[in-house]
């Protein structure tokens, strides 16, 4: 199998060609620096992405809180993670960096808040 991968490690954006058989990399070409080799290998064998989304937020003027994974998640698990995120509601106050979902789906990645939100109290 051959796959062309655009490297995102640096601004050059090399088009790296990776060939492999049975889950093993055989050749890597097209990289202009050594940092492209591990990137292309990982992308070929098990592509991962940072998941960004929102969760429902109570106790604030804002209806949603932006969140992201603190470590990359395997690409084939993203939709399952989104199903878990969809079920979550948090209550203000929230600080940026707070863990909203710990170890999502047992993948070793936490969903963290990417913004701080203060609690809003309404006068009676």
Image: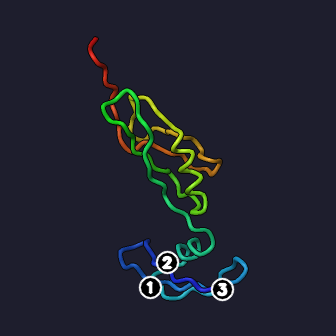
Q: Earlier in the sequence, mark 3 or mark 2?
A: 3
Q: Earlier in the sequence, mark 1 or mark 3?
A: 3
The answer to whether 91 is drawn above or below residue 11 in the figure is: above
Residue 107 at x, y percent in the picture: 63, 51
Residue 60 at x, y percent in the picture: 34, 29
In the picture, measured across the screen, residue 7 lies left or right of residue 120, that is: right
Secondary element at image label 2: helix
Of residues 59 and 27, the one nearer the viewer is 59
Residue 12 at x, y percent in the picture: 37, 79
Residue shown at 50% from the left, 39% from the top: 99
Residue shown at 39% from the left, 73% from the top: 10
Q: CA distance from mark 3 to mark 2?
A: 15 Å
Do the CB atoms of the residues marked 1 and 2 lie less than 8 Å apart? Answer: yes
Residue 13 at x, y percent in the picture: 40, 78
Q: CA distance from mark 1 to mark 2?
A: 7 Å
Disc assigned to residue 26: 3
Return the residue at label 1.
32
Residue extending farthest to the left is: 123
Disc 2: CA contacts within 10 A as few (<14), some (14-19) or many (>=20): many
Return the residue at label 2.
36
Q: CA distance from mark 1 to mark 3?
A: 18 Å
Q: Quadrant of residue 14?
A: bottom left
Residue shown at 70% from the left, 76% from the top: 23
Disc 1 or disc 3, which is closer to the eye?
3
Disc 1: CA contacts within 10 A as few (<14), some (14-19) or many (>=20): few
């Amino acid at each position: 199998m051959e796959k062309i991968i655009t490297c995102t490690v640096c601004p050059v954006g090399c088009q790296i060609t990776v060939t492999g058989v049975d889950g093993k990399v055989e050749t890597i070409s097209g990289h202009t620096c050594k940092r492209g080799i591990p990137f292309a290998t990982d992308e070929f064998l098990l592509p991962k992405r940072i998941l960004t989304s929102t969760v429902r937020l109570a106790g604030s003027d804002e209806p949603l809180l932006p969140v992201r994974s603190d470590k990359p998640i395997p690409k084939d698990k993203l939709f399952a993670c989104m199903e878990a995120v969809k079920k979550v509601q948090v209550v203000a106050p929230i600080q940026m960096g707070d863990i909203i979902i710990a170890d999502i789906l047992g993948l070793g990645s936490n969903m963290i808040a990417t913004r701080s939100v203060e609690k809003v109290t309404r006068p009676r």
